[in-house]
Image (cartoon, rainbow, N blue to C red):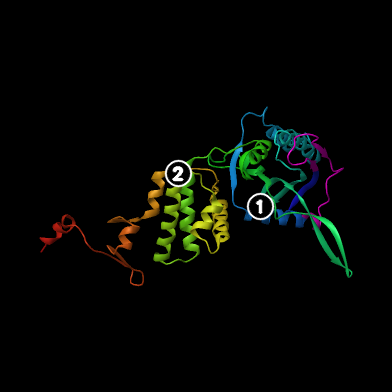
Amino acid sequence: MINHITYHALLKEQGTTENVTIELNPDELPVADSTNELLKQLMERYSSKAGKGYGVFEEDTDSYPAVAILTDYIEEIDSFYQITERFMNVLKTESESQVFAKGGKVVFINYTDNEKEYFLVAILSEKIGLLAKDWNLTQDEFLNFENLRFAGRISLTDWQDPERSEDCRYISFLKGQGEIAGYFKKFLGCNDVLIPKKETQALIDYLEKFAVEQELSLEARTQLRNRADIHLTGLLESEDVFILQTFANVIWADAPQDLIDSFESNGRDNGYEISDGFIPYKRSLRSLRVYSHKTKHWSLSFDVDAYTNGDIEVDVENGSITITNVPIELLQPFSSED
């Protein structure tokens, strides 16, 4: 449900930092079918895009004014329209430092979804399109949702929750690439410090949940884990960073968006979405190649090579696992039993 919505214009030519200006909408937009459709299309595109960053507000509120602006809104010192004007001035200043940043329509939406309140900002470019109506063709400009590059969302509910966990990252944004993405992150006042161990473990957990969702056989699940292990180990050895889109293209090539959507869903459900930009944590990767389970009376752990080379045989229908080539030391205690 939309509480407030408006958009303004950032006028800036790519390739220069001169003559950056803003044009302000005279007022908020009324909540109507058109604005609801705008939010719907924005969120569908935003949710489907890989390459997000997650974080919290920077502590230096003088250098990063987003906290002060939103605090004034929450405390009803400024109206929604007034804070969007303040945000536009910040965005203008930040874009003036980036030669390759482009202008566009800057959409601001305060909305509620599943009992949580959000503040969303996105920069949309326009494209020329043809409209066929009344047996005529007319040319017009349309908002380009497909080319969404700059967008961020702040969970006002999570941010204000005094009991939120240390893991709660209430800001999400499209990371993009290089300094261009950095200027938008600074505009949001977001600190996206990454913890490789936690990011890697969440990645592996969500991969296992994806395998369950896909109802993969043990052999198919093993192949999936192997592909993930090879890719992530390669990143670790070359000190390259994890990119979800690339990861999905490599390990689930036939339908990479299915894996991306699953990871996004699991992240929302667990309160910890996976961010691009971390180098995989070596020790956590070991679990990709190991199956283990423990009960009160026994524990079993084996890596995927044991299954591949036949040391471990799995009979799912009969609920049994057979271990061959067992070392004599393990068998010896049973050989003298009556």
Q: Which of marks 2 and 1 is in front?
A: 2
Work out whether mark 2 precedes mark 1 in sequence or the reverse, and give the earlier one.
1
Residue at 53% over, 64% down: 254
Reading the image, the residue beneath label 2 is 238
Considering every residue shown, the one lying at the far top of the view is: 62
Considering every residue shown, the one lying at the far bottom of the view is: 317
- Judge whether 315 appears above or below 90 on screen: below
Residue at 41% over, 57% down: 226
Say few, some or many: other residues with alpha carbon within 10 Å of mark 2 (under 14 / 14 to 19 / 20 or more): few
Q: For this view, does 103 lie left or right of residue 58?
A: right
Secondary structure type for disc 1: helix
Looking at the picture, which amino acid does disc 1 mark?
Answer: Tyr
- Judge whether 285 appears above or below 136 on screen: above
Instruction: State the image coordinates of residue 144 (x, y, percent, origin top left).
Output: 74, 54
The label on residue 46 is 1
Q: For this view, does 52 lie left or right of residue 317?
A: right
The image quarter containing residue 305 is bottom left
